[in-house]
Amino acid sequence: MPISFHEVLFPLDIAMKSAGGPERRTEIVTFGSGREQRNARWAHSRRRYDAGYGVKTFDALQAVVAFFEERRGQLYGFRWRDRLDHSSAAPAGALTPHDQTIGTGDGEQASFQLIKSYGGLYAPYARQIAKPVPGSVRVAVAGAEVTSDHFTCDTASGIVTFAGGHIPPPGAAVTAGFQFDVPVRFDTDYLEVDLTAFSAGAIPKIPLVEIKP
């Protein structure tokens, strides 16, 4: 991630009440017969959020304005906690070091990128995880969990690196469990807030967009 990123988390109490989700870009061509041809314009999804739904008090609104000003609007990215999707575990499941397969050992490779897979029957999608929550990463090799002194995880890139003498042997599955944030930025340089409307219950629009690693 470039220097224009701040490793700081958007106010969690606001993020947990916000709206948003993944976006994809699909090109659809319709022929005269009525048949369609569909092509994916993007190989990876991109998430969008609206933090305005989580702003319920004047104090929360002031906190967002302060956060926006420190980020200089769209200039600096930051961490965002997606309430729907922030763990490697299955829905309603507990995090384990066996949640996601991140690679297979060859006796030489020491570094592995954290990923999360979606689906599995027809066209599973592998999402690169670049912002794991510090202290949340658990790793296993060939089914056995390894202790934290056997590896490090760069929480700014999501790369797990095994220490010398602990590199996964050939054919050994490398798995991991983790919590993660989404790297985002504000999708506007102008926050328009009508305080009269806000007092009456109107929700300010605070758009955010995911930054691709």
Image: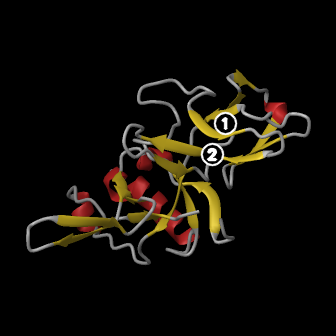
Residue nearest the observer in this picture, 116 or 154: 116
Residue 137, label in figure: 1
Left or right: where 163 falls relative to 27: right
Query: Nearer the N terminus, badge 1 or badge 2?
Result: 2
Residue that carries the numbered disc 2 in the rendered image: 114
Answer above or below: position of 47 versus 188.
above
Which quadrant would residue 141 be assigned to in this image? Answer: top right
Mark 1 is surrounded, within 10 Å at the Cα level, by few (under 14), some (14 to 19) or many (20 or more) other residues, namely many
Left or right: where 203 falls relative to 60: left
Residue nearest the observer in this picture, 161 or 69: 161
Q: Quadrant of the N terminus?
A: bottom right
Q: Residue furthest bottom?
A: 189
Which quadrant would residue 200 be assigned to in this image? Answer: bottom left
Looking at the rendered structure, the kind of residue marked 2 is Leu
Residue at (63% x, 45% y) in the render: 114
Mark 1, secondary structure of its residue: loop
Which quadrant would residue 124 be assigned to in this image? Answer: top left
Kindly report which numbered mark, 1 or 2, lies closer to the viewer in this rendering. 2
Pointer 1 with pointer 2, Cβ within 8 A: yes
Residue at (34% x, 54% y) in the render: 20
Q: Quadrant of the C terminus?
A: bottom right
Residue at (91% x, 35% y) in the render: 165
